[in-house]
Amino acid sequence: MTNIVALDSQQHQHYKLREDLLFSHTQTAHILPLEVTEFAAAAVSFPIVFVKDSATGQFRACALTGLQPGQNLYWHETGWQAGYAPEAIRSYPLLAMRADAQSDEYVIAVDAGSPLFNQHSGEPLFNGSAATDYLQQRAQSAIALAKRVGLTAHFITRLLELELLVARTLTITPKNAESYDLTGLYGIHEQRLDQLTAEQWLSLRANNGLLAIHAVLISMKQLPLLVARLPQ
């Protein structure tokens, strides 16, 4: 069970962080968060989709790793099966959160429910009241990732302004099994993309938006390969 708490040099003085290159916490995750700066690298491994939070209405960009909830076709006990691992799962169980909505300062937090965060094995996080070099390096990476979350939110806002996001139903046809539909996903509206004005097109290009859009479109070529990963 997820339990996000701020790291504290007193409370967590004897805690350590263990590395898990298998990314075992993703074993049942059929989508994984992606940031816009990752799209080009991720596109050669996963279909990139957008999902909408039913509670907040906010969109997130994700790597599609399974074809039904609870299924990650890239996870295997012998090792991660994709050429790319999203930054969010590499950063886990650490994350950086703004101290408050108006602040540029970040607080480093941890999922205290993760077995990677423990008092027995791994890299020490504190030396007395001071963060170890290891924690400082991990914290810097977490802060950099948190800043890229803002870039992704801005990119998605621009897609919505230009009406470039459209609901998609993916029809999955496994070998030797009946077809079924995967819903709740959004993709790039290619027809609307072709209808953009020159000014809108140039505004996207100026902010590297076109690169990200084309990465999303190219990434959908990974869908048949993902279907081929389904157990026979």
Image (cartoon, rainbow, N blue to C red):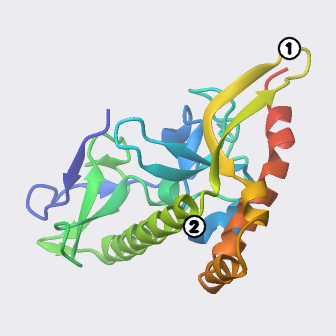
Q: Position of residue 230 (x, y in %)?
A: 79, 28
Residue ID for mark 2: 36
> Which amino acid, mark 2?
Val
Query: Is the residue marked by circle 2 packed among few (<14), some (14-19), or many (20+) residues within 10 Å?
Result: many
Q: Nearer the viewer, residue 118 or 164?
A: 164
Q: Is residue 141 above or below residue 220?
A: below
Q: Nearer the viewer, residue 129 or 173?
A: 173
For residue 36, which quarter of the picture?
bottom right
Q: Position of residue 175 (x, y in %)?
A: 90, 21
- Identify the residue shown where x is 79% and y is 23%: 231
Work out how far the residue at label 1 is from the one at label 2, CA to CA, in angstroms: 35 Å
The image quadrant where one finds the N terminus is top left
Q: Residue 228's x, y, as percent?
A: 86, 34
Q: Is 103 placed left or right of 145 in the picture?
A: left
Mark 1 or 2 closer to N-term?
Answer: 2
> Residue drawn 84% across and 13% down?
178
Q: Which residue is mark 1?
A: 177
Q: Nearer the viewer, residue 212 or 43?
A: 212
How packed is label 1: few (under 14 Cα within 10 Å), some, or many (20 or more)?
A: few
At numbered mark 1, what does the secondary structure look like: helix, strand or loop?
Answer: loop
Asked whether 39 or 21 is in front, the reply is 39
Question: Which numbered disc covers residue 80?
Answer: none
